[in-house]
Image: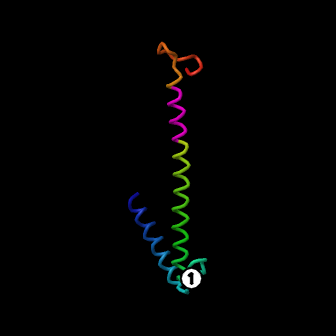
Amino acid sequence: MRLLVILLLVFFVAAGVVVGALNADLVSYDLAFAHVQWPKGAALLAAVILGWLLGGMTAWLGLSVRHRRLRRVRAGGQAAREPDGKRSPASA
């Protein structure tokens, strides 16, 4: 299994080197506040990394909100006990 992972890693690194070498032309980006020129391969890599990071953060935030909501519901269920310490039939 470890050998397979290493082989896949080497393959994708080699593919990235080839894509970067074949796309060495400069691409001009005119942002509202700056003007930059990057090689096509670097721009593609930056876009992939930015998408990966934003997607990961979106998933993490979604799970965090869900876990917080579940904790709040569970904490509210414990507070719905009757004064004698027994649980009410609605919360059981």
**Looking at numbered disc 1 in the image, what kind of residue is underneath it?**
His
Q: Is residue 10 magenta?
A: no
Find residue 31 and report its horizontal and vertical position in percent.
60, 77
Q: Quadrant of the N terminus?
A: bottom left
What kind of secondary structure does the magenta stretch mostly adopt?
helix
Q: Quadrant of the C terminus?
A: top right
Find residue 61 and report its horizontal and vertical position in percent.
53, 51
Q: Give the quarter of the image for residue 55.
A: bottom right
Which residue occupies 51% across, 51% down?
A: 60
Residue most extreme to the top: 84
Residue most extreme to the front: 33
Q: Is residue 72 magenta?
A: yes
Which residue occupies 51% across, 19% down?
A: 81
Q: Nearer the viewer, residue 17 or 81?
A: 81
Which residue occupies 52% across, 85% down?
A: 24
Residue most extreme to the left: 2
Residue on which the image places disc 1:
35
Above or below: residue 70 compared with residue 91: below
Give the color scheme: rainbow, by chain, secondary structure or one colour.
rainbow
Find residue 46 and report its horizontal and vertical position in percent.
52, 72
Category of crowding for the residue at label 1, using alpha-carbon neighbours closer than 10 angstroms: few (below 14), some (14–19), many (at least 20)? few
Magenta residues?
A: 67-77
Local secondary structure at mark 1: strand
Which residue occupies 52% across, 16% down?
A: 82
Above or below: residue 29 compared with residue 67: below
Q: Does 1 sit left or right of 27 as displayed? A: left
